[in-house]
Image (tube, rainbow, N blue to C red):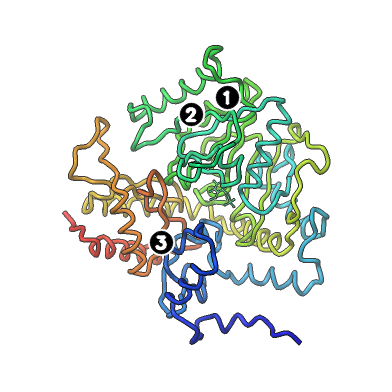
Amino acid sequence: MTDKVRIDTLGANSSNGNNQTYLARQAEFESNVRSYPRKLPLAIAKAQGVWITDVENNQYLDCLAGAGTLALGHNHPEVLQSIQSVIASGLPLHTLDLTTPLKDQFSEYLLSLLPGQGKDYCLQFTGPSGADAVEAALKLAKKYTGRSGMISFSGGYHGMTHGALAVTGNLGPKEAVDGMMPEVQFMPYPHEYRCPLGIGGEAGVKALSYYFENLINDVESGVRKPAAVILEALQGEGGANPAPVEWLQRIRKVTKEHGIVLILDEVQAGFCRTGKQFAYEHAGIEPDIIVMSKAVGGSLPLAVLGIRKDLDVWSPGHHTGTFRGNQLAMAAGLTTIKYLKEHNIADKVAAQGEWLKGKLADMQKRYPVMGHVRGLGLMIGIEIVKPHETPDHMGSYPADPELSALLQKKCFEAGLILERGGRNGTVLRLLPSLLITNAELEIFMDKFENALLAAGIKPV
Ligand SMILES: Cc1ncc(COP(=O)(O)O)c(C=O)c1O
């Protein structure tokens, strides 16, 4: 008989190694492409709720939560129970796209969260990553319209596969990758602190809305009418940057008038993260395609598109993928999305976001390196700046990516896991479990302030 895999020998009670030995072995085993361990150098032994424990028994407040995947935090008892009940039920763990009673329930419930309780939408289960769901959405928009172009926005993040990367703003991972999907036109995305038109305020948003509409209408814009516009209603990786409501509404209006498919990428912002079920709801708009992943699988891999039925021009099998039938993910996902709805977590998150932004605004007065606090619900960003340098004509200070990186490190040393995002990683981002309590957010505030002090930042 072969040895069973013994996870306990790798866990907290292990005498096998400390963080450094695990990290060194990881570096030996894995490609140079690994990223998080460079910023968060730990080996995780266990996790519960908003807390992570490493193999040396250090505890961290986890404000990354699997990049927003863990809507109910680590190892939520109801999520674990749902996984165990699938295992005990005799259901196959994986079914391609064959249906099961569990998948049937999951689909009905997920559809009920979409606009109009989903009566005009159908679902497409894609390969389990957000990027594959984005690929499917782009392809479907092309097939539906018979056009090939895409409009995307600066600061947008849609994944790392070729098509998804082509519509992603960040130039770093695009360098030296030739043969990107052609005909992608980037447009400027509004930014309260760093208006891309250099105008700022209401006038900046109005100009951006006008610019978008004009580009679509202008027969000499040089840009062929696209198949789709893809965007996040609140950019996550782009630095917790919410779109103004009137801008989103204008985009919906113009895309509808021109028969352009509007794809809302809710991979990160969906499922109550921003204080609404979906982030587009802040603008009261209805997308043509909704891209969902992360929280929809309740911490396990799953990705789904919500497609307006009249757009569903797929022929059978024209976008497949082996792993579209993960029953454990559907069980965990159904438990998660039901929990969020039944406990009205969206309202709790909305209120908490405002409370937290208020607290951070107070802290900002004492620590002007916190140049801009933004976001909605529990998707909050703090842009780190150089407050002693000359601000630009909109009153915004130069970004300080070095200090932001140092603060992430000091947070980690203070037992706080925070992600960075935005241009050059200058935005410290909060993306915790949606069940985090105000008391735990107070701990976040204390640890964050300790990190500022440890980085040599003195309060004013
Ligand atoms: C908005 C958004 N879209 C797409 C993706 C890609 O998802 P995945 O990493 O699962 O491919 C991400 C990942 O962070 C995301 O934040």
Q: Residue at x 47, y 78 (%)?
A: 55
* Disc 3 residue lies near ligand 1 with CB under 8 A: no
The residues tagged by marks 3 and 1 sit, at their Cα atoms, a distance apart of: 42 Å
Element type at mark 1: helix
Q: Residue at x 83, y 41 (%)?
A: 316
Q: Is residue 311 depicted above or below 276 in this figure? A: above
- The type of residue carrying mark 3 is Lys
Disc assigned to residue 304 = none
Q: Position of residue 376 (x, y in %)?
A: 44, 47
Element type at mark 2: strand
- The type of residue carrying mark 1 is Lys
Q: Would you say 366 lies left or right of 249 here?
A: left
Disc assigned to residue 39 = 3
Q: Around disc 3, counting alpha carbons within 10 Å, would you say few (fewer than 14), some (14 to 19), or many (20 or more)?
A: some
The foreground one among 399 and 217 is 399
The image quadrant where one finds the N terminus is bottom right
Q: Nearer the viewer, mark 3 or mark 1?
A: 3
The image quadrant where one finds the C terminus is bottom left
Q: Position of residue 355 (x, y in %)?
A: 38, 53
The residues tagged by marks 1 and 2 sit, at their Cα atoms, a distance apart of: 17 Å
Q: Nearer the viewer, mark 2 or mark 3?
A: 3
Q: Residue at x 46, y 75 (%)?
A: 53
The foreground one among 27 and 449 is 27
